[in-house]
Image (cartoon, helix red, strand yellow):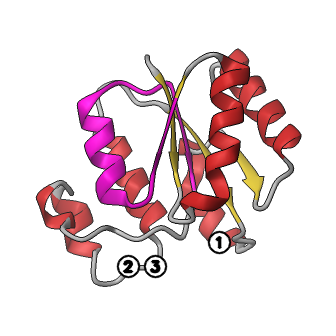
Amino acid sequence: MSGLLFVDDEVDNVSLAAEILAEALDMQVAVVDSVEAAVEALQEGRWRLVIMDLFIPLGAHPHRILGPRARRYQDNVEHLGGLVLLEEIDRLEDRPLVISHSACTDHVLFELFGDRVVRAIPKPAPIDTLLHDVMEVLQEGK
């Protein structure tokens, strides 16, 4: 798999972290700002790891790339795009590992993640914590 996909609508806040991760891990790191852009990236290439916020927008034209289940929920989960993205990741043949990087503290939402999310990192996280957790997840491969 090729690298790390960072999905966060606050691109300015995660760009530095993405650059540091790319250099420290010596791997490609891409940053996208919506579910639509993330699904396009996931369809274009293989990713080893996705670091995603829970509160991300669906995008300008989600109907073009979202599957039938996600389209059915798009009006009800506009502010919870991370859940829609997880549904889209589930449709992939070769699924990447997923880390949640969110300011959300709602345990019910985290329960919805189930075992699809291998680690939850609170946001904002110091870069050394983020790097440590990402490296640990990549080494464990689970």
| Numbered circles on residues, count | 3
Q: Residue at x 30, y 68 (%)?
A: 59
Nearer to me, 101 or 127: 127
In terms of image quadrants, where is residue 22? Answer: top right
For badge 1, the amino acid type reads Val
Locate residue 40 relative to residue 52 in the image: left or right: left
Provide the residue designation for mark 2. 78
Labelled disc at residue 135 = none
Q: State yes or no: residue 140 in magenta.
A: no
Judging by the rendered image, the residue that carries numbered circle 1 is: 108
The percent coordinates of residue 30 (x first, y second) are 47, 38
Q: SS at mark 3? A: loop
Tell me where the magenta segment starts and ends, as one range: 29-52
* 69 and 75: which is toward the camera: 75
Whole-number angstrom distance, CA of label 3 to CA of label 1: 16 Å
Which residue is painted at 36% across and 42% down in the image?
90
Q: Mark 3 points at which residue?
A: 79
Mark whose residue sits in front, 1 or 2: 2
Task: Name, please, the residue furthest toward the bottom.
Answer: 76
Looking at the rendered structure, the secondary structure element under dot 1 is helix
